[in-house]
Amino acid sequence: MATSRHLLAILLTLIPHLVYSNSSNGFFYQELLNGNGNGEIHFNGVKLHVESEVQSVFAVRGSNVTLPCRYWYDPVLNTPRKIRVKWSWLPPSEEHESDVLVAIGHKHRSYGEFKDRAHLQQLHPGQISLLLTDVRLKDSGRYRCEVIDGLEDESATVDLELRGVVFPYQPPHGRYHLTFQAAQKACAEQDSAVATFDQLFSAWQDGLDWCNAGWLADGTVQYPITQPRQPCGGLSMAAGVRSYGFRHRHLHRYDVFCFSSSLRGRVYFLEHPEKLNFTEAAEACREDGGHIATVGQLFAAWKFMRLDRCDAGWLADGSVRYPISYPRANCGPSEPGVRSFGFPSPHHKHGVYCYSSQ
């Protein structure tokens, strides 16, 4: 009899901690108190789901973009849950994710390059989308939306891809002089970033044809060919993106493919009464309230603003180029593009392309 009373007492103490679902299928979860007094749920038949309704989202530099994500329970729970939301980011050239934002309820914290630019959108029940403001060139990559409820942990991914233009680049001292680190620096100096394979592949689909091999963001070396020819892999090879595979980032030297996105300001050909050498050109742009344009800025202006000018002009790296959106006689080849005269002597006289943030 004493034993029966003892068992009954134990059962009576457990009953208040058993919580049953209102659904007819009998699923339930049990709430156990852990050492610090916070409730932790051990699910039994309740499934946590996390989903992004799209695989990829596209944006341009300087814009705001929303990466969609939502969560729900099956069967539906009638009691609100306190969950932890975490957004992380895997850049194209990296192996490990970085924290973007962590949130509990309506409180959140953003990290690193995303500090004060990453915000959680919770406009509807279950919505935990990520809003990124002032998108930057390096923001492209795979983003993971993770929901943690007690011991349950589910996630979904969405890719952020930037719209832009890919251009091959080699420094003034000639072909195949850039290590991977030097390639990163060269693109950054041109207001751009090292292109990803997806960006180069998309450019190839749009007609980019270039026979010099260049670094990509993942450390591979590749080049796009739309018209097979003997010096570029041979006539027997089909059109495509040729690959040298992964190369040693410190020992091997190549050119680089850079990527530039939307332009915040404007690029313009400076109307000047006379031609200018390189030093005079840079000074003329400063006197006009701007600065001499970079190669990336000229390509972005050509791509996004249809800049079209049949006059060669200095750029910040010491090259001379001009943009053609509407091919015509005496303005180079029959395809649109940015024409290049290479790196003439800085004493030669040319026009100049300036950039203004206004």
Image (cartoon, rainbow, N blue to C red):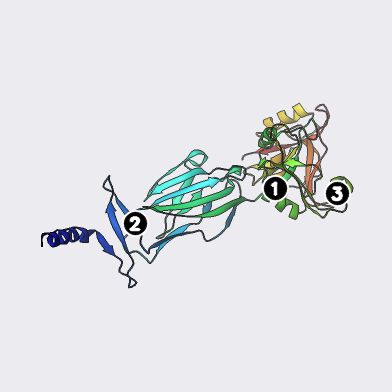
**N-term mark: 2 or 3:** 2
Which is more foreground, mark 3 or mark 1? 1
Displayed quadrant of residue 152? bottom left
The residue pinned by badge 1 equals: 165
Q: Which residue type carries mark 1?
A: Val
Tell me, for residue 42, which label it has, or none.
2
Which is more foreground, mark 2 or mark 1? 2
**N-term mark: 3 or 1:** 1
Local packing at callout 1 (Cα closer than 10 Å; few below 14, some 14-19, many 20+) is: many
Which of the pair 142/330 is nearer the observer? 142
- Are discs 2 and 1 less than 8 Å apart at CB? no
Residue 176, x across and y down, in percent: 78, 35
Q: Which residue type carries mark 3?
A: Pro
Residue 137, x across and y down, in percent: 61, 43
Mark 3 vs mark 1, CA separation in Å: 19 Å
Local packing at callout 2 (Cα closer than 10 Å; few below 14, some 14-19, many 20+) is: some
In the displayed structure image, the side of residue 100 where residue 291 appears, left or right:
right
